[in-house]
Image: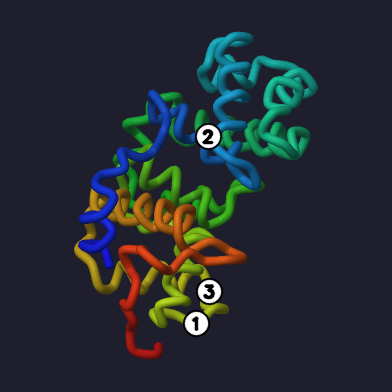
Amino acid sequence: MFERLMGRFGPQGWWPGETPFEVMIGAILTQNTNWTNVEKAIANLQREADFSPHGLLALPPGRLAELIRPSGYFNQKAAKLRDFLEFYLRSTGGEKRRMRRRPLAALRRDLLAVRGIGPETADSILLYALGKPVFVVDAYTRRVLSRHGACRPDASYDELQRLFMDHLPPDAALFNEFHALLVRVGKEHCRKSVPRCEGCPLEGLEFPSP
């Protein structure tokens, strides 16, 4: 699957974001919206405040919510951002290297304990901001795999993640590229309502029933 997707689409260069901290903020803001809206929200934050954990926490909660309005669910996301920023400062002292040095399992557990951070958001932060070898699962991943017989449509997040991590080397660059390629084929071919199977790089690829 990876070889077919890479052969058709080539490297995707994910995740959008100029710094690891921006990727972390983007991972929270992108919940239930698209990246174009996230970019607008981040641009607002960068214009208004010092784009740092201390700078963003210094914003009044209502103003923070207003600045991230383009990302949708802005009041809830403002609260999530504040909780994450407090966690970030508490656990790292503002030094990202301290977070990166922590063992993957322990850091993932602590991220999941932060309000509003679920598995997909936590794993996006771990993989794309910190370079940890953990596979990110999203709706595109589930749709593509289930339609090709690699998993049940109702497989859990953990089951889907293990499918990749148990059968691939623990390589952050590989996980990064594979996930991005699944999103690409999901958007262009494996659409939610009417899939465009003709010409899809995965056309005809079937896995044994799980």
Q: Is residue 80 left or right of residue 174?
A: right
Q: Is residue 189 above or below residue 102?
A: below
Front residue of 16 and 88: 16
Kindly report the distance in space between the C-alpha atoms of the residues bearing marks 1 and 2. 30 Å
Residue pictured at 68% horizontal, 26% vertical: 68
Find the residue positioned furthest to the front. 198
**Could you say which quadrant of the image residue 159 lies in?**
bottom left
- Tell me which amino acid carries mark 3: Ser
Q: Disc 2 designates what residue?
A: 26
Q: Secondary structure at mark 1?
A: loop
Labels 2 and 3: the sequence-earlier one: 2
The quadrant of the rendering that contains the N terminus is bottom left
Assess whether mark 2 and mark 1 are in contact (beta carbons under 8 angstroms). no
Structural distance between the alpha carbons of marks 2 and 3: 24 Å
Around disc 2, counting alpha carbons within 10 Å, would you say few (fewer than 14), some (14 to 19), or many (20 or more)? many
Could you tell me residue 204's position as x and y percent?
32, 78
Q: SS class of the residue under badge 3? A: loop
Task: Pick the residue in front: 33 or 31.
Answer: 33
* Tag 3 residue: 156
Q: Residue at x 55, y 11 (%)?
A: 50
Inspect the image, locate mark 2, and give the three-letter code of the amino acid beneath it: Gly
Inspect the image, locate mark 1, and give the three-letter code of the amino acid beneath it: Arg
Residue 127, x across and y down, in percent: 36, 47
**Which residue is identified by label 1?**
152
